């Protein structure tokens, strides 16, 4: 049987399914076959036969052997009942042999990435079964569409609403502390925060618990935001009780008058307040609470503006100011806010200075115990982290230019900074990064480099043809694939660095080939349990696709972001 005409024209492998082959179905393209002069083969649907065969095999495997005359225990009866119930809808791996992954780029590695899930591959429905959670997740016909009833955290109706502090402490120290750091669990900043402030500043621990509970809600473990919001308010209340600093949204006049930073007289309290504001702001990002996030960003900008940053830049306070720039750039993206924190630090060059000054605070704190291996890792990680922070600052600067009248000098300055960063990144090879165990930040920095290129092009040259920077989008997709393949991460796990999914968003809106666009969008959707900002990103990309496919021109990203509503933040 010959290829379909569309796959033949696009020079793709065709699986020859009818009435629509897989590449055409995924790309939303018309599928047609040329009439053949050879024998005509009948297309026969074998789905039901495979399903029946798998059901029988599943029952045979799940039937326990019991000695004659022996009564089964209640536990054995339960196990037998569950196996018998689950068997009819399960597929044996052998039934997947008919799929040609090479003919479908979006399926690359997908079965290896979901080891606990079973797949119904019938032509009329795509259903994903999570064997661990025992839930069915309906998938839409288009990889980039989110079904109307899709909601982060709603995967299990029996999820608890709250959780104890002991559970939050365990999840934070054992899981999140190492997940959001390229370093090991022992020598990273998150572990340091918990150990340092656990007995002295209760409001810091409450902020860490709020952030942890928000993660548990987004991944479906907790059924509501209640626990996260309770610890959020508890942190602010404890801050008021301990330092007489009241930073709730209702106390806007006092905090904006820049009087509250004067109440902080000790460096230890300054560090504690900085950590608290950061994790409360990150909680707001996870829960997509844009107004609260902007409030926390304004508090940090007020704190930075009230004192000389250079004098404190070697402390935790200085390091948290650098971390805040990541949230500041995200909140300002597509002209959704200002980048006051990035401006306070002096844009990309000032941020580079701040990183250099605050980078070794953990070494200085643990100078007697800090391992030499960690010191070598820090030295390899440092230039890549500096490059990433400079790119984050450029995102904020470009967003600032989008909200005002731009001239050629702004674009020239941005391109000069990008060229400088490109030269720095070129001095480090991917092989060397892997050898030094800094491959994650290396790939992230390179993906972000191409994302900033796309964003600058979209802002400074909005009248260019659609998909004008496709090569940068394709580079991002290639880097992301290497990220998951080389670091052996499942596709449902978002990259732990603080700037994703921004590179994927830029790739999804700029790639010309619909297969690449759908691949990037599907990956964002797969990572939706990382936070509600990932769901926002999916909806945003879909709206951009709809506008640009209808007009053939570049969409106004700022207008689309504004139309997304008051809680839109990515």
Image: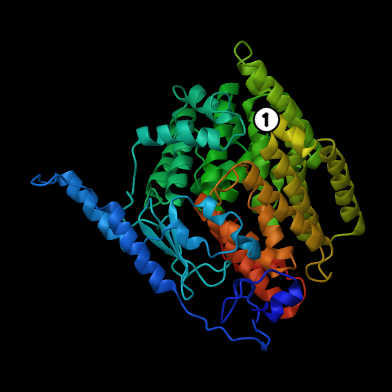
User: Could you say which is closer to the camera, residue 202 or residue 520?
Assistant: 520
Give the answer, above or below, for where 64 lies relative to 52.
above
Give the answer, above or below, for where 131 lies relative to 388.
below
Q: Residues within 10 Å of mark 1 (few under 14, many from 20)?
A: many
> Is residue 50 left or right of 391 when viewed as pictured?
left
User: Coloured how?
Assistant: rainbow
Q: Quadrant of the N terminus?
A: bottom right
Q: Secondary structure at mark 1?
A: helix
Q: Quadrant of residue 565?
A: bottom right
Q: Residue 309: in sight, yes or no? A: no
Q: Residue at x 68, y 34 (%)?
A: 306
Measuring from the top left, give residue 488's x and y in whole percent: 59, 43
* Residue position for label 1: 318
> Is residue 263 left or right of 200 when viewed as pictured?
right
Residue furthest to the left: 69
Q: Residue at x 49, y 23 (%)?
A: 195
> Is residue 446 left or right of 191 when viewed as pictured?
right
> Is residue 406 left or right of 511 when viewed as pictured?
right
Q: Quadrant of residue 55?
A: bottom left
Q: Quadrant of the C terminus?
A: bottom right
Q: Quadrant of residue 316?
A: top right
């Amino acid at each position: 049987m010959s290829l379909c005409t569309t796959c033949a024209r696009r020079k793709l492998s065709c699986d020859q399914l009818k009435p629509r082959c897989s590449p055409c179905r995924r790309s939303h393209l018309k599928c047609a076959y040329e009439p053949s002069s050879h024998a005509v083969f009948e297309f026969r649907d074998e789905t039901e036969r495979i399903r029946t065969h798998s059901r029988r095999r599943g029952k045979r495997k799940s039937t326990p052997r019991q000695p004659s005359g022996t009564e089964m225990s209640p536990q054995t009866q339960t196990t037998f009942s569950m196996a018998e119930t689950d068997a009819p809808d399960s597929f044996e791996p052998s039934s997947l042999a008919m799929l040609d992954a090479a003919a479908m780029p979006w399926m690359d590695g997908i079965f290896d990435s979901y080891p606990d899930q079973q797949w119904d591959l019938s032509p009329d429905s795509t259903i994903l079964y999570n064997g661990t959670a025992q839930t069915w997740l309906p998938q839409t016909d288009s990889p980039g569409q989110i079904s109307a009833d899709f909601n982060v955290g709603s995967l299990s109706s029996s999820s608890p609403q709250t959780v104890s502090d002991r559970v939050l402490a365990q999840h934070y120290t054992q899981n999140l502390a190492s997940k959001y750091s390229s370093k090991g669990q022992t020598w990273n900043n998150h572990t340091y925060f918990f150990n340092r402030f656990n007995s002295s500043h209760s409001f810091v621990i409450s902020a860490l618990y709020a952030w942890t509970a928000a993660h548990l809600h987004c991944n479906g473990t907790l059924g509501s935001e209640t626990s996260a919001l309770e610890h959020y308010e508890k942190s602010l209340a404890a801050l008021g009780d301990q330092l007489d600093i009241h930073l709730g949204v209702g106390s806007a006049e006092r905090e904006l008058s820049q009087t509250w930073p004067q109440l902080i007289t000790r460096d230890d309290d300054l560090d504690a307040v900085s950590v608290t504001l950061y994790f409360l702001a990150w909680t707001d990002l996870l829960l997509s609470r844009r107004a609260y996030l902007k409030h926390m960003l304004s508090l940090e900008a007020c704190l930075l503006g009230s004192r000389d940053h250079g004098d404190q830049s070697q402390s935790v306070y200085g390091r948290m100011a650098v971390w805040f720039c990541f949230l500041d750039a995200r909140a300002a993206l597509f002209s959704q806010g200002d980048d006051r924190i990035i401006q306070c630090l002096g844009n990309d060059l000032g941020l580079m200075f701040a990183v250099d000054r605050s980078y070794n605070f953990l070494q200085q704190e643990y100078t007697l115990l800090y391992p030499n291996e960690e010191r070598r890792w820090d030295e390899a990680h440092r230039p890549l982290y500096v490059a990433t922070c400079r790119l984050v600052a450029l995102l904020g600067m470009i967003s600032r230019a989008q909200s005002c009248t731009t001239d050629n000098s702004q674009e020239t300055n941005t391109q000069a900074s990008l060229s400088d960063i490109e030269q720095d990144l070129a001095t480090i090879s991917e092989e060397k990064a892997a050898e030094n165990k800094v491959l994650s930040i290396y790939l992230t920095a390179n993906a972000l480099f191409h994302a900033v290129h796309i964003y600058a092009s979209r802002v400074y040259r909005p009248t260019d043809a659609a998909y004008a920077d496709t090569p940068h989008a394709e580079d991002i997709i290639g880097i992301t694939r290497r990220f998951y393949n080389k670091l052996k991460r499942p596709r449902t796990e978002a990259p732990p660095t603080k700037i994703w999914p921004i590179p994927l968003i830029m790739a999804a809106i700029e790639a010309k080939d619909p297969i690449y666009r759908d691949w990037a969008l599907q990956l964002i959707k797969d990572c939706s349990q990382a936070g509600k900002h990932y769901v926002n990103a999916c909806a945003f990309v879909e709206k951009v696709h709809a506008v640009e496919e209808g007009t053939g021109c570049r969409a106004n990203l700022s207008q689309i972001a504004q139309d997304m509503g008051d809680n839109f933040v990515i």
